[in-house]
Image (cartoon, coloured by chain):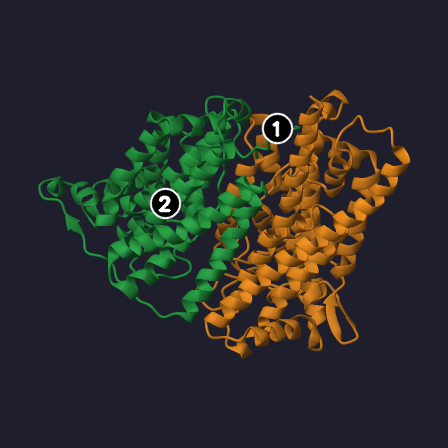
Chain colours: A green, B orange
Amino acid sequence: MIGDLLSALLDVATSEAAYINALTFAVFLAFGATGEWVAEKSGTLNISVEAMFLAAAFAAAVGMDRTGSQFTALLIGIGASLLVASVQAEMSHRLVANQFVVGLTLNILILGLASFLASELTFSTRKSDPVTIPILSDIPLVGQALFDRAWLFYLIYLVVPVCWWMVFRTRWGLELRSAGENPQSADVSGIDVNKRRRQGIYVLGVTAGIGGTYLVLAAVGQFEDSIVGGRGFIALTAVIFGGWTLRGTVAGCVLFGVVLSFRLSLPALGYEVSGDLLAASPFVLTILVMAIFAARVRSPNALAQPFIRGLK
Amino acid sequence: MSTGFDESEVDAISLTPGTGEHEDEPASTQSTTSRRLAVSGEVLVLYLICIAIALGLSALLVQVTGGSAGDVFNALLDGSFRKPGRIGLTIGVAVPLLLVALGTIISTKAGLVNIGQEGQVFLGAAFAAYVGTEMGGPGPLVIVALLIGGVVGGALWAGIAAVLKYRRNVPEVLTTLLLVTVGSQLVGYGLKNQWLLLAPAEGRSNRQQVSKQLTDDVRIPRITWFGNEFPISAFLALAIAALVALALASTVWGFRVRMLGQNPQTAQRAGVAAERYGGGAMMLSGGFAGLAGGAMLAGGDFGNYTLVPGFPSQIGWTGLLVALVARQRVIGAIFAALVFASLRTGSGFLAATGVERRVTDVVQGLLVLALLIPPALLFLRQQRRATAAAGDRT
């Protein structure tokens, strides 16, 4: 039994296709998770990533069909995702409505809207062509997975460092983090807490917009309303799994990408596997990590707590 | 989910802008009444405006995509209660929504954020399906047993989150949410294995994943009133609603739960064990969701008395929204459950208008968002006034 498992893992580890599959998922998750990490650093536990992904994927698919330009499609995708982000941000951090309610409602609303509009409009897209980076893509095993991809894929090499730099190397980032750690103190020192939190959600809107566009144009190639299928929650989970560090978050995305890709790569290599249990494993893993490392893993202090100035 | 703005609280803040203003007692009592009337009138207008905007946006969406908003509206009304027999269906859908919402009210009052009802409903339905198909004996006994099975399933699932919260300090928001997917995959696994839930190979097509069907005698009896047929679990739900309202408002247990929700520090000093009351409220909330799952399975308004993948079909999420829209009031939850249920049953009549039925999800989402706005606006205004008044005093 364990021998079987090991040989299965070895087969996967030496198959080029497995790396390609795993990174396709991982990068998609990482687009959402990086932005989600920024939002959570500012104190929002944002559960509408799912809606943002879906809105972007839908808008990008329509945009691609109507304009024929991938770049325009990307802008439209980001725009749609930002629209969702603006509802989330304004309602939960200007009107102080409960952030989970808003997020949950948005998830249902956008799923309904996307599948409704998808049945009303006709559009078709196809998978975009890879941009091969010479030499680097010749690295055995991982070369193709990392450097022979659609151009949208390479944006991840930009998104992650930029988010890190913004959060840890700018004044804005310091204020954002203080809004998530100790909003009362931040407020007293003149920081507009809710504004920083809204901005955190807008950053998520941009990255999730790229993620949704990447999903439909580079990973799947065709829009369907189950295209995101709960993976927004996995992106959210990756941040928690990573213990609210960017390093851990990205590692979580890669790990979950590998696990998700097992569903494709194990049967392709002739192994039988229970898809249900595999699909549940990112969540189980994250719960275990939280339970075991609860003392070491520290969430932002004011995570998911609304900030209301005044008599409290 | 401490929304923190109970209307009474809001009023209390608005009506006593400063604490040192008690000299003109008689005059202020008079103005209090008129002011309260003005405030409630304002609230009503605000709600109406927001609902109108939500419905207007939905109508616009239908018109732009080539449908007719009037037709859609009529079809929704026909499908939810105007056509004969539809009221019964709407009641049948409202039952699990109300049960889920009641559970949510309890956990929210205890200051807990349970957003995993969808999973708890599914686990409850799975436990109920197992009990209902495996246990022999007289029908009524099995019905009770399967409902209890549902309660146990949901409570266990929420219990995981409770244990992790009180023993390992893991936020229940995260665990309940994560357990939704784990739960649905777990039940999906059960539905692929015959020793758990999967029906025997004969009587179903090869790759279909369904449980055995509940036999006639273990289904919740349905009664007919004025041509409307609905399961008698509707009465059970109403009775439980009354019980929950009573328990929360006027028992020691309810008092302690509410104290825990409003101020955990005070509760601790008063000797309310957070673990016991909070954990209990969490498990009750899961149990109610599980009961909803059992009632869905045996009630007959959701499929064919069999468990299938995706069985909860958003009843858990919607039930949670019902509780929040009703702002943790039991009476409000009954009405909200009926409204949301009629959107769902009404959508069954949309095919005739040529408009995709998913449009009701949009209407429902917009309505919920719209209903969030007025209380938030009022709360912000009261907060501003109170801050200004406090500023005057210093």
* Residue at screen point 51% across, 29% down: A291
Position of A186 compared to B216: left or right?
left
Q: CA distance from mark 2 to mark 1?
A: 37 Å
Q: Chain of mark 2?
A: A
Q: Is residue B365 visible?
A: yes
Instruction: In this rendered view, identify the residue nearer to me: A161 or B301.
Output: A161
Q: Which residue does the numbered mark 1 point to in the structure image? A: B166
Check the image and report above or below for A179 versus B185.
above
Q: Which residue does the numbered mark 2 point to in the structure image? A: A206
Query: Which quarter of the rendered picture does the C terminus of chain B lie within?
Result: top right
Q: Quadrant of residue B106?
A: top right
Position of B169 compared to A84: left or right?
right
Q: Which mark is residue A142?
A: none
Amino acid type, mark 2: Val
Instruction: In this rendered view, identify the residue nearer to me: A255 or B307.
Output: A255
Image coordinates for residue B22, horizontal then vertical, percent: 85, 29
